[in-house]
Amino acid sequence: MINSGRLVTNRGEEEVDGDTLRPFSESLPMLLLKAREASMRAFRPMLAAHDLTEQQWRVLRALTSLDGAPEVTALADITFLLAPSLSRIITKLEDRGLISRDTVPQDQRRALISLTRAGIELVAEIAPQSEALYSLIENHLPHERFADLMEGLQSLAEFRIDDI
Amino acid sequence: MINSGRLVTNRGEEEVDGDTLRPFSESLPMLLLKAREASMRAFRPMLAAHDLTEQQWRVLRALTSLDGAPEVTALADITFLLAPSLSRIITKLEDRGLISRDTVPQDQRRALISLTRAGIELVAEIAPQSEALYSLIENHLPHERFADLMEGLQSLAEFRIDDI
DNA sequence: TCCATTTAATTAACATGTTCAGCATGAATA
DNA sequence: TATTCATGCTGAACATGTTAATTAAATGGA
């Protein structure tokens, strides 16, 4: 394993191409992917220790940050999960007793999702470690550069091809 | 579908929460996810028209950008795909006749991956449209801000929790 | 040479991403 | 009110993400 140059792969393996490759391997989509992977890699072991996936944790965390119990569609928006994925996740978390699903009497199609006591306790247990990891990642960049990065990402996230 | 405010979801649906939510929904990992999704969304219809997934296209594009035929491990590094995913993708692209797999005589474990003529032709057909889309996305931000963004992402992509 | 160890790649198993279809419920309207 | 349409959610099908186990081949000593 040799990391001689600055163009190295993401798993610590040796350089593959020193020139031709750069435009591809360091394109915007690839950098977005790698940056996200780099930040998520820090979380997975902790979540795995609690038998949670990234997405399951996202759902629990979103429910914690909200006041009331959201409907499935609203929860999908907040967590940025597609409805079918969220549907499966809800089923699983419900089976584990971490969340509950209550149908709205006025509209039987809708279901309100909320944390159970067990869910609240699990989040309370994990949250501090999660926050500590976030801080570590954010502090990887100087304050101002981090703010610029967030701003740039915010703008990019609003890109829509149809708007052109 | 109402997009009244600036905090809107990514599927064009209405605002869910105007305040409490922001710290979660606009955290770094979520913004990375949304920014990537926003850029990828532009490509999917074009790739789907050629019956290609994002990852399959990444493999074809990487093979095009290289001089020789890489081994599977090297290709995994370049495309940022995990070995099991790449293994399946290679099988599929090989079945479609777009790439070929040649085992190395000196070391029967290794296989060299290369584009077939059909693969080369397919890439040549798609590449121009792909480049055009990239330009659109890049131009969504002013030049300097885009450069800053790339630099920030590059730095973030190098984050390793073990380094702390 | 034999065997334990490493290495390259694949397979297995489960969860999610993505698109499409379908089902049940509500709402709108003729 | 009966029909049509829209909405909220779930199911299906296939591809990938992720971790762990496995196969096959090469390597490195005893």
Image (spheres, coloured by chain):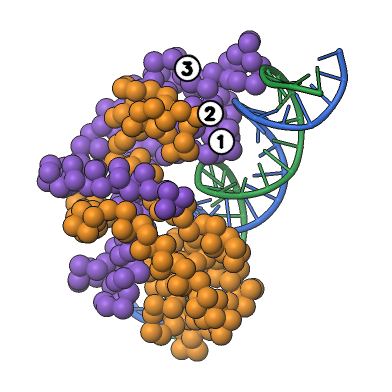
Chain colours: A orange, B purple, C blue, D green
Is B157 drawn above or below residue A77 in the view shown? above
The amino acid type found where label 2 is placed reads Thr
- Give, as a three-letter code, the residue at label 1: Ala
Q: Position of residue B12 (x, y in %)?
A: 29, 63
User: Residue sitting at 33 percent across and 64 percent down?
Assistant: B27
- Asked if the residues shown at circle 3 and circle 2 are in contact, with their CB atoms under 8 angstroms apart, the answer is no
| Disc nearest the viewer among 3 and 2 | 2
Question: Residue at 29% of width from left, 71% of height from top?
Answer: B22
Chain identifier of the residue bearing label 2 in the image: B
Instruction: Determine the CA span between mark 2 and mark 1.
Output: 7 Å
Residue B147 at x, y = what percent? 18, 42
Relative to the observer, which residue lies in front, B45 or B87? B87
* Residue B69, label in figure: 3
Q: Residues within 10 Å of mark 3 (few under 14, many from 20)?
A: some
Q: Is residue A52 visible?
A: yes
**Drawn side of residue C9 relative to residue B51, left or right:** right
Quadrant the N terminus of chain B occupies: bottom left
Residue named by callout 1: B83
* Mark positioned earlier in the residue sequence (2 or 1): 2
Can you give x and y, in whole percent of width and height, for residue D8 in the image? Answer: 44, 74
Under mark 3, the amino acid is Ala
Q: Secondary structure at mark 2?
A: helix
Q: Which residue has dot 2 on it?
A: B73
